[in-house]
Each structure stands twice: as C-alpha cells, then as structure tokens.
Amino acid sequence: MKKGGKRPRTKGEPAFYDEMKKRVNFTLTPTGIEGLDELAKAWDVSRSELMERIGRGVIPVSKPEESTS
Amino acid sequence: MKKGGKRPRTKGEPAFYDEMKKRVNFTLTPTGIEGLDELAKAWDVSRSELMERIGRGVIPVSKPEESTS
C-alpha cells in the first residue's frame, strides 16, 4: 500500500520510525489484553502501536511519582 | 485452587490475578521497548506487568478524548 507519495512499504525497512521493530513477548491475562485492545481502539492504533507510543511517551502514562507526590 | 499468596508459586496457576496469563506478541522498536522498560522500572514491575496494569486501568493512560475535548 502506497502512502503519501512515498515508496511502497518494503519488508525489512522501517515504516514509521527510523528503527526496525522487533518481536517482544508479553504474558498478560485476557482481561489485561482486552483493556489494551480497548485503549488501542480508543487511539485508533494497533495493540503494538499503542505500546510503542506509550514507550515513546507519545501517549502519556502516569508515573508513580506523579500519583504519590 | 488455593488462594491467598501463602503457597509457593506453582506453574499453571495464576499468581496475582484470577486468570492464567497468556503469551502475546508485540512488535516494537528498540526505542519503544526502552521507554516501556523505563516506565516498568519506575513502577517497579516487569514489562509484562506494566502492560497488564495499563490494560486493567491500574496505571492510567491518557485517552484521546481527554486530550481533544
């Protein structure tokens, strides 16, 4: 699928970020997964992309300091 | 199944929640993973547990509505 007049997506090349994504395994309960799916849907992204954005700080997550201080 | 956290951890039994966890695969960039690790460290939990808590709403995450409205 072409995007914005750029080259078509090629395997082995990063799509949105400068780095290649790699597979990470998480162990979650079905309830946890469901909640993540809902969040992902709310942000209109995939579950992985949700995690990616949380990791990059694009989607802000509370930090313990914030709730304690 | 015994409950109450007294018994040693047994394989095949849930440790903290009432459900068995299952493996989920995410594809993330190293930067995303690093950020998640930092968040996990801040909360003093594992990466998976971080996701679990985010999914369960224990750790609050911004929703698009909140930042748009």
Image (cartoon, coloured by chain):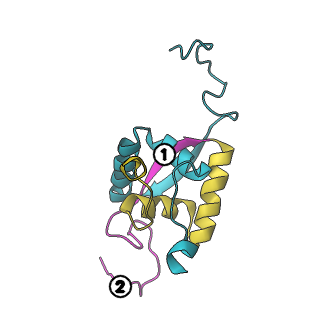
Chain colours: A cyan, B yellow
Please report the residue visible at 70 percent of the width from the left and 33 percent of the height from the top. A18
Q: Nearer the viewer, residue A67 or B1?
A: A67
Chain of residue at mark 2: B
Magenta stretch, main secondary structure class: loop
Q: Which residue is mark 2?
A: B4
Which residue is drawn at the image coordinates 37% and 47% (left, top)? A37
Which element type, helix, strand or loop, lies under badge 1?
A: helix
Q: Amino acid at mark 1?
A: Leu
Which contiguous range is marked in magenta? B1-28
**Quadrant that contains the N terminus of chain B:** bottom left
Chain ID for label 1? Answer: A
In which quarter of the view is residue A28 placed?
bottom left
**Label annotation for residue B1:** none
The residue under the point 38% across, 63% down is B57
Residue at 33%, 58% in the rendered image: A31
Label pair 2/1, CB-CB below 8 angstroms? no
The percent position of residue B9, horizontal first and vertical second, equals 46, 76
Q: Position of residue A50 (x, y in %)?
A: 48, 45
- Mark identifier at residue A50: 1
